[in-house]
């Protein structure tokens, strides 16, 4: 297929409106045909962190994007059930798509040289970086900074960690997650313990 797709991976524990607003912005700026959200099974950068059951994270993501025709989900990493390496996922997606843009945050660009097979990733996909006004410039830049397409994206101060804390402390998460995601969190008693 000759579609221009963006892929956006993460733990999405839970997915929040910040994820949706910034990827919407990338979708428009990069004139993509669609963005595929890829929830990881275990992030190589968060191996010491317990994430919610992948089924819950996948279900919340489905609810969050169900009415957005140019957003979709790929559960390849969850089905694989091991540490999720972006390189392996892109190799898999290359079977279906010729043109792929890998969308990451500026914090991930800073450590991109430590990723699994960064050069090979860039042989297969363009690197698109979401940079917010609050992201500090880095003094020591590795070679991947020159290869990245840096987009200035809106600064949305929402974090999944903060949302989990708010649920645990019985505080409202209205406006932080889509309403159906909030319902799902409450119904399944996520983040309570």
Image (cartoon, rainbow, N blue to C red):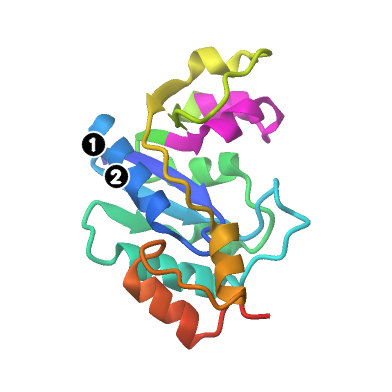
Residue 78 percent location from the top left of the image? 56, 63
- Residue 136, position in %: x, y? 57, 24
Q: How many marks?
A: 2
Residue at the image point whose x is 46% and y is 60% from the top: 15
Locate the C terminus and report the quarter of the image it occupies.
bottom right
Please report the residue visible at 63 percent of the width from the left and 26 percent of the height from the top: 110
Query: Does the image show residue 15?
Result: yes
Q: Is residue 160 left or right of residue 115?
A: left
Q: Quadrant of the N terminus?
A: top left
Residue identifier under label 2? 24
Is residue 9 part of the magenta span, yes or no? no
The single residue placed furthest to the bottom in the displayed view is 187
Please report the bounds of the magenta region as a residue range.
102-122
Name the spot of residue 171 as percent of width and height, x first.
52, 73
Q: Are marks 2 and 1 in contact (CB under 8 Å)?
A: yes
Q: Is residue 72 above or below residue 86?
A: below
Looking at the image, which residue is at 51% across and 64% down? 14
Q: Is residue 4 visible?
A: no
User: What residue sits right under mark 1 in the picture?
Assistant: 28
């Amino acid at each position: 297929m000759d579609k221009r797709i963006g892929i956006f991976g993460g733990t999405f524990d839970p997915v929040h409106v910040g994820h949706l607003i910034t990827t919407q912005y990338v979708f428009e700026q990069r004139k993509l045909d669609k963005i595929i959200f890829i929830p990881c099974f275990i992030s190589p950068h968060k191996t010491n962190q317990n994430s919610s059951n992948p089924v819950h994270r996948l279900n919340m993501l489905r609810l969050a994007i169900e009415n957005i025709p140019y957003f979709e989900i790929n559960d390849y990493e969850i089905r694989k059930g091991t540490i999720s390496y972006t390189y392996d996922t892109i190799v898999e997606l290359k079977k279906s798509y010729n043109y792929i843009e890998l969308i990451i945050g500026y914090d991930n660009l800073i450590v991109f040289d430590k990723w699994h097979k960064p050069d090979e990733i860039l042989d297969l996909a363009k690197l698109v970086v979401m940079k917010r006004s609050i992201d500090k410039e880095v003094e020591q830049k590795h070679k991947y900074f020159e290869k990245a397409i840096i987009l200035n994206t809106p600064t949305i101060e929402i974090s999944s960690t903060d949302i989990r804390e708010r649920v645990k402390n019985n505080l409202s998460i209205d406006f932080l997650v889509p309403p159906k995601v909030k319902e799902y969190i409450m119904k399944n008693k996520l983040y309570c313990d």
